[in-house]
Amino acid sequence: METNATPKDIQRCLSLCGPSVERLHKKDGDFIYDIEVTTNRVDCMSVYGIAREAVAILPQFGFQASLKPLITTKLTTGAISGLTIKNDPKLCKRILALKINNINIEPSPKWLFDRLESVGIRPINNLVDITNYVMWEVGHPTHVFDFDRISTGKMIIREAVKNEKIMTLDDKTYVLKGGEVVIDDDHGKIIDLPSIMGTANSVVIPQTISALFFVDSVESPKVRFASMSHSIRTQAAALLEKNVDPELGLTAIFRMAKILKDILPQSKISPLLDIYPHKPEINPITINIAKFNDFIGVNLDPVKIINILKSLNFQVKITKSVLTVTPPSYRAHDIRIPEDLIEEVARVYGYHNIPSVLITGSLPDKPHDQTFSWEEKIKTSLKYLGFTESYTYSMVNDSPDGLKISNPLSSEWTQLRTGLTPSHLKLISENIGKDKQLSFFEIADVYLPQKHGLPIEESRLIVSSNSSDYYKFKGHLETFLSDLRIQNLIPGIKFIEQSFIWEISVNQLITHAKTVKTYTPISKFMPLIEDFNITLSTNYADLEEKIKSFSPLISTIELTDKFNSKLTIRLTFLSSDKQLTKEDIASIRTRIENFH
């Protein structure tokens, strides 16, 4: 880039309208920029990409700026003698290759050595250093093979089979999971983990006399899968997992050829092999020019808008007041809708230039978040009933029903939980002795498996206690349900490992809860109250529910005494229509007395 802006000016302007320059420091006459690039802007993750941005931004601040073309060596395309590459277009979008003969493996010249060291890259040898230099300069990863170590002369792009092994060039062995993209020599030997890291059996060595410059564009989901599955985080993987423009591959290999001829003028370069089966289509975006000002809030001249778009290398066609804009290939993945174009114009124009004006008119209605509101009510009620809110990990490692995580970050957390109960049993066991009675609650997600696709996340409430008093625990839950004005929902309490547990879907609670209280007029008639002795043959909750179903005249049921399985319960009978007599409840009494 040629400009009259100083490095400090470039730092300030880029930070205001583009990638943020966090630090600027000088080393051996060069200025080194530490730049934070957002993950959607893979086109800026290179020296050339930053220069493109600067050329668009600097003129907005009154500086001159023009992009110097990269000096490359143009090559004719054709086959490479002694090499056959079989690609799978579903796995790799583009492959470029050059065979290099008559070379010497030696240290890089000082300028190349120093440039790599200044940005924290360890120089290795002249050929490997060229690939690293071009990757950082152009923004597309590149690789170099020892051509003679590809003994079959064949390179097959395929998916790995489960349990295949590779040794990467840093002498680490990996067992493949299956599905990773690899390069096979057609005899079953893997000679590369493309777009991530080379293998030890094909890397250039001091004795290398023939090499193969290689550029591939493996499908980004495949790159991400292999890189994260095996924790191999290289700059190549970090770029290609973000959909690097395959058009840049051609620029990269031309640039490698130029640098090679500069430092090894005696080298011989083959024709360029370019396998590019499906060139991606770039869809144009249509937008009314008035929409820019509506969204940005500033009346920008249409010529200004068009010039900003063109400075970013967008192709612009004008039909009356409508623009048809086609982004360059390196922006095809992050510029897809009209709002993306508006954002580009706004940031290059400068957010700092947009006046800060308070909005006028009525405030928009904020949609009521019913779920959040109910969760607050749930937490408040349980807090006042003496329960303590807890937070447990959503990942576990010993649940029989847990969903196995394919790439766990730790051996301690290998599964997603499908329920909250195991977490709270562990919570209680870890805290026994710290208090006489432990009472917890938590609202958290569980992950329910599906036959196809990702699991469903479901929000659940769990209430747990190591209390020995079932009726006290049940009473707390009934009070809680009453606070939410929930009727006819009997808590299904579980007793596991000396703890009482109640777990329920938050959505189920919200469905039954009411925001408005329902009042029933007090009956003007006197109730009838009778005690019954019953032998408990089921759990008490089921007993209570069954007896209530006998008659709507049963107003309340109260447990007054208990000895082993013998219960004394007190029933209150009440009618709003008449004064009940013993004859009115005779049939109900008989059913209760005969109940077992």
Image: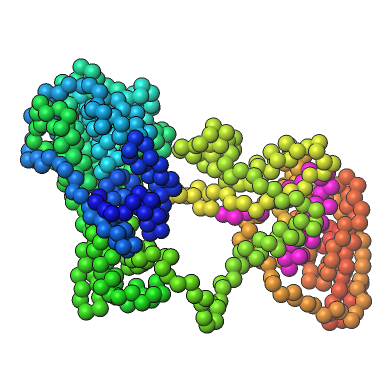
Relative to 502, say whether 98 is above or below: above
Q: From the viewer's side, name the closer residue of 41 and 513.
A: 41
Give the magenta range: 458-485
Q: From the viewer's side, name the closer residue of 434 and 320.
A: 320
Q: From the viewer's side, name the closer residue of 44 and 496.
A: 44
Q: Which corner quadrant of the image does residue 104 belong to?
A: top left
Task: Return the x and y of residue 571 as percentages of the image width and height.
Answer: 88, 64
| Residue 103 in sight in this render | yes
Residue shown at 90%/79% (left/top)? 525
Q: Classify residue 313 as left or right of residue 375.
A: left
Q: Which corner quadrant of the image does residue 292 belong to?
A: bottom left
Q: From the viewer's side, name the closer residue of 396 and 129.
A: 129
Residue shown at 91%/73% (left/top)? 527
| Residue 189 in sight in this render | no
Relative to 545, say whether 187 is above or below: above
Residue shown at 78%/37% (left/top)? 432
Q: Classify residue 260 as left or right of residue 26.
A: left
